[in-house]
Image (tube, grey):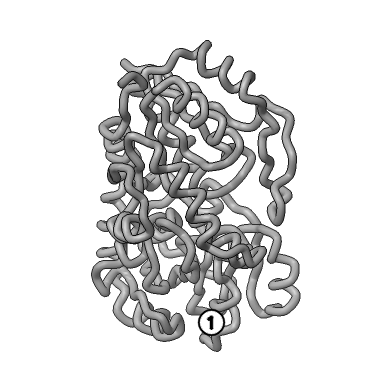
Amino acid sequence: MARILIVTDAWHPQVNGVVRTLDTTTRTLRALGHTVEVLEPSGFPQIAAPFYPEIRFALATPGTVADRIRKFAPDHVHISTEGPLGLLARRYCMKRGWRFCTSYHTKFPEYLRALARVPERWTYRLLRWFHNGASAMMVATPSLEAELKARGFTAPIRRWSRGVDQSIFRPRPRIESQYPRPVLLYVGRVSVEKGIEEFLKLDTPGTKVIVGDGPARADLEKRYSQAKFLGYLNGDALGECYAAADLFVFPSRTDTFGLVVIEALASGLPVAAFPATGPIDILTRQELGTCNDDLKLAIDAALKYGDREACLREGASYTWEHCTEQFMENLVGVVN
């Protein structure tokens, strides 16, 4: 059994795919008998992130991070995020000649361009420096691997897919909706970079339902009063929301995977999306959904050709056990 250190600036109480991925992976690793330490912000003074006040960055020092790493004495170090803790853990490993691996979860260059007009080339330069120091970099999809290689990322790339909690996202009896059909569902952060307004402004029949919260919610809820904004849901309440919908709409062009896409499939929902990283790797057959640069056409086609049974079978193939096996195979020892 191994001693595994996971370093992340994204952790509870944040609600997003990165946190769900790391939390589930950690619990699965521990169930397999490994000793896992998560170095995350709650053990340090914190400051709110610009544009995302609900996200807190750790105000850690090199000494405190070094003490935590030394005391744990890991066999493997996985640095999952490029924030303050990730930078300090990277610094510690580089100074000692330790090997470590990273993962590319978030398209920060695109996020910062959308939120603050920061040129993408500036942020990509920083991310190349960060990840190219690793002995391995994990990515979720072939399209993301190709994109990063084209942008000059040279660290060895290894695949790390995602899974679905089959106890929540599963076949359920058809639930009657309180809203006019078809019910078009979005689940995720309600923020500018997620492209939700491109979905809300479409003239489509039925009802648009938005599950989640974020900095853009108040403005969008005011301007698109016909849509139903339900806030955060989890557990069976979220699973039942999927079961009451007719189609899942994923309007983001900036995600690296889209965990909610496979949760929708596991719930029997076809998906309409832009042909972006994640959806183009997952929606490979018309019965699973449609990718199109015209989101309205994608919605129409997915409603017409999507097949519930095909979606259920595809969604069931994404398991956290398999993802955790991939993660373990991708780890590198800390010593050269």
Residue 184 x, y percent position in the rendering? 50, 73
Tally of marks? 1
- Label 1 sits on residue: 206
**In the figure, residue 29 lies in which quadrant?**
top left
Q: Residue at left 41%, top 81%? A: 293
Q: Is residue 266 visible?
A: no
Q: Is residue 119 left or right of residue 223?
A: left
Residue 46 x, y percent position in the rendering? 72, 35
Q: Is residue 226 visible?
A: yes
Foreground pick, 187 / 331: 331
Foreground pick, 323 / 234: 323
Q: Is residue 321 left or right of residue 117?
A: left
Residue 110 x, y percent position in the rendering? 53, 63
Residue 143 x, y percent position in the rendering? 31, 61
Identify the image quadrant of the N terminus. top left
* Above or below, comparing residue 253 to residue 71 in the picture: below
* Above or below, comparing residue 324 to residue 257 in the picture: above
Q: Residue at left 63%, top 19%? A: 63
* Above or below, comparing residue 5 to residue 325 in the picture: above
Q: Residue at left 63%, top 54%? A: 232
**In the figure, residue 202 lies in which quadrant?**
bottom right
* Above or below, comparing residue 165 to residue 145 in the picture: above
Residue type pointed to by label 1: Gly
